[in-house]
Image (cartoon, rainbow, N blue to C red):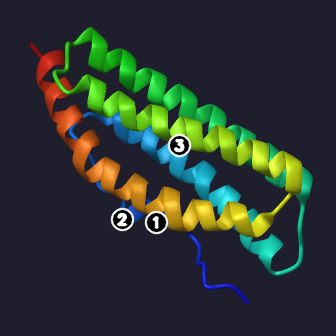
Amino acid sequence: MNEYKLPVVDPDKMPRVALELMNSVHEEEIALVNELGALLLSGLDGVVDEAAITQSLAAWISHTREHFEGENRLMRNHKFPPYPVHKGEHDQVLTQLGQLDKAWSENRDVGMLARFLYEDWLPWFNAHVKTMDTVTAGFLNQAMTR
């Protein structure tokens, strides 16, 4: 038995930001994370579907890359002053996801993926949305309605 629960992120408890485009992208990401989380919890309970986990992980990483590129583009286009700081967090997470993907392809460790998702990514995501994304969305919402 493991200590992790589903959903990884409860969509009904996800903080909303001032830009609907960002909320939609966050909802898509949450769906992908919850799908991966379900596969990982099954794996921790002894039912490992490596192909499905690999596919789900790849979809999440691809979506995250597109998510961050879209936000980075909006911040650049609208000259968001703290863009380098926000982009820096994006770059750091993309590096971690690349390392995670490599580690998964080499050792197929379901526990390692679950620990990252629940113990590293989840607290980061919650804090990032409540701080950086909230400020960024407020700025972009104002800039885009001028």
Position in image of residue 96 (x %, y %): 58, 44
Distance from label 2 to label 3 (Cα)?
15 Å
What is the three-letter code of the residue carrying label 1?
Asp
How dense is the environment of label 3, judged by Cα within 10 Å: few (below 14), some, or many (20 and up)? some
What is the three-letter code of the residue carrying label 3?
Glu
Horizontal side of 87 relative to 116 (left or right) equals left
51 or 97, which is in the foreground?
Answer: 97
Say which quadrant the C terminus sits in.
top left
Can residue 10 be seen here? yes
Q: Earlier in the sequence, mark 3 or mark 1?
A: 1
Say which quadrant the N terminus sits in.
bottom right
Position in image of residue 107 (x %, y %): 87, 56
What residue do we see at 26% from left, 33% from top? Answer: 19
Which residue matches tag 2?
13
Q: Quadrant of residue 38?
A: bottom right
Q: Earlier in the sequence, mark 2 or mark 3?
A: 2
Position in image of residue 72 (x %, y %): 37, 22
What is the three-letter code of the residue carrying label 2?
Lys
Which residue matches tag 3?
28
Which residue matches tag 1?
10
Mark 3, secondary structure of its residue: helix
What residue do we see at 86% from left, 57% from top? Answer: 108
Residue lying farthest to the top in this orientation: 77
Q: Which mark is residue 44?
A: none
